[in-house]
Amino acid sequence: MLSYRDDWIVKSNVESGDGYSDIVIKIPDDEIGMIIEVKYGEDADMDKGCADVLAQIERMNYSAILEDDEVQTIYKYGVACYKKRCKIVKA
């Protein structure tokens, strides 16, 4: 779904920082990168799920792979899913 653009580099479950990020996207021409982490929102607490995911992105330093490539702008997204609902937040 995210790789429809030929100029986007999309990787899933890639080693970065101190762990493996769910999705890393790099747009080389624009020097933009994105980290997307997805978790199941336990007990339908979507706010807590999103907060936990954003904290994990920071704690595990998932942006390191983009920083090493000198990406200038890095967006970080946390996604919490529960049954058929989801919530997305941007750091």
Image (cartoon, helix red, strand yellow):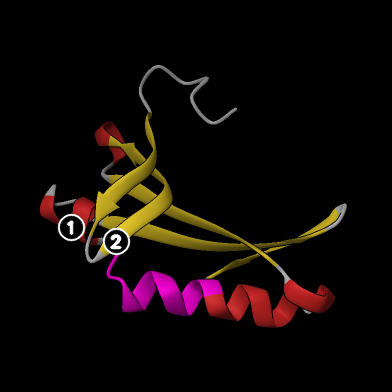
Question: Percent x, y for residue 11?
Answer: 37, 36
| Residue that numbered label 2 is attached to | 19
- The quarter holding residue 46 reads bottom right
Q: How many marks?
A: 2
For the residue labelled by badge 2, is the local secondary structure a helix, a strand or a loop? strand
Question: Tag 2: Cα neighbours inside 10 Å, few (<14), some, or many (≥20)?
Answer: some
Say which amino acid is labelled 1: Glu
Question: Percent x, y for residue 48?
Answer: 67, 83
Say which amino acid is labelled 2: Gly
Residue 51 lies left or right of residue 26; in this view the side is: right
Q: Judge whether residue 69 is colored magenta.
A: no
- Spatial CA span between label 2 and label 1: 15 Å
Which of pointers 2 and 1 lies earlier in the amino acid sequence? 2
Residue at point 47%, 21% (across, down): 5
| Residue that numbered label 1 is attached to | 67
In the rendered view, would you say 9 is above or below 79?
Answer: above
Question: Tag 1: Cα neighbours inside 10 Å, few (<14), some, or many (≥20)?
Answer: few
Per the rendered image, the range of residues in magenta is 53-62
Residue 3 lies left or right of residue 29; in this view the side is: right
Relative to the observer, which residue lies in front, 83 or 73?
Answer: 83
Image quarter where the N terminus lies is top right
Magenta stretch: helix, strand or loop mostly: helix
Relative to the observer, which residue lies in front, 1 or 18?
Answer: 18
Q: Judge whether residue 60 is colored magenta.
A: yes
Q: Nearer the viewer, mark 2 or mark 1?
A: 2
